[in-house]
Amino acid sequence: MVVQFTDSVAGTPVYINPEFVVSMRPDPEDPINLTDIRLSDGEELRVHGDHTDVADKLARALPA
């Protein structure tokens, strides 16, 4: 299942499959509001949301 977030650079929706997330961390410039996500294909995204909230949203979308 894919999860929708808002890209902080373009302001457009991005859809992320949590199975392809390699790492995520708080954005150093705005750690409360932005999260940096790295995907298995090497792409990096900066999305709106605290990294804890983003992680919870992605975890709920993973198959049991």
Image (cartoon, rainbow, N blue to C red):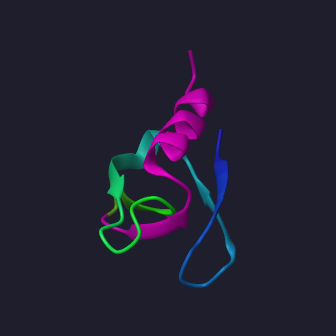
Q: Position of residue 24 (x, y in %)?
A: 35, 51
* Residue displayed at 37% across by 69% down: 43
User: Quadrant of the image for the C terminus?
Assistant: top right
Q: Position of residue 31 (x, y in %)?
A: 39, 61
Is residue 52 located in the magenta-colored stretch of the structure? yes
- Residue 16 shown left or right of residue 52 in the figure: right
Instruction: Count numbered badges in the picture.
Output: 0
Q: Position of residue 16 (x, y in %)?
A: 56, 53
* Residue displayed at 42% across by 47% down: 20
Up/down of 55 relative to 28, above or below: above
Up/down of 12 relative to 58, above or below: below
- Residue 14 shown left or right of residue 17 in the figure: right
- Residue 26 shown left or right of residue 19 in the figure: left
* Residue displayed at 46% across by 58% down: 32
* Residue displayed at 54% across by 42% down: 53
Q: Where is residue 14 in the image (x, y as percent from the top left)?
A: 63, 65
* Residue that sits furthest to the bottom in the current view: 10
Magenta-drawn segment? 42-64
Residue toward you, 35 or 19: 35
